[in-house]
Amino acid sequence: MPTASDNNSEAPKPKSRRSARHAIEFRCRSADEKQKIVLLAEAANADVSEYCRAKALNQKPQSLPSATGERKLLIEALGQLGKIGSNVNQLARAVNMGRNLPEAAAIIEAMQEVERCGAAIREELFKSKP
């Protein structure tokens, strides 16, 4: 039978690879305003989150490390693979919803292959991290 002291103790939470993140979101007033922020972040060689965070804290944005050579190609391949995976996932969802698409098994197999390729690319990127 649980006791009152059992309620006060929590099991330790597993640690993630990344430190805890806390989100703040905001909306731009227009598409032009958003585009200007994106361009300013690119000019500072920072991602938009880093740029906005640094500006809000009156700091200089930290530049993104430049990927070169094989690492750059792997990053681009991972991005393209993500787009392909999204398309295949939409087809798999249609199959799971009961739509009778030709070669449903091939679609599911393709999605699994996209996931395997993505895992292999991420593993290689992690190994070659600068």
Image (cartoon, rainbow, N blue to C red):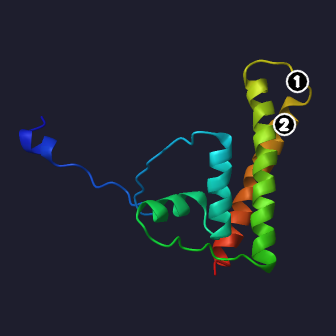
| Tag 1: amino acid | Leu
Please state, as top left, top right, bottom left or bottom right, where the C terminus lies in the image.
bottom right
Q: Position of residue 21 (x, y in %)?
A: 42, 56
Left or right for 42, reference 61: right
Q: Position of residue 64 (x, y in %)?
A: 62, 72
Q: Residues within 10 Å of mark 1 (few under 14, many from 20)?
A: few
Q: Position of residue 77 (x, y in %)?
A: 81, 61
Task: Give the residue drawn at x 8%, y 44%.
Answer: 5
Task: Give the residue drawn at x 73%, y 25%.
Answer: 96
Q: Which residue is mark 1?
A: 101
Circles 1 and 2: CB atoms closer than 8 Å: yes
Please state, as top left, top right, bottom left or bottom right, where the N terminus lies in the image.
top left
Which tag, 1 or 2, sits closer to the chain's start? 1
Work out how far the residue at label 1 is from the one at label 2, CA to CA, in angstroms: 9 Å
- Helix, strand or loop at disc 1? loop
In the picture, the disc for residue 107 is 2
| Tag 2: amino acid | Ile
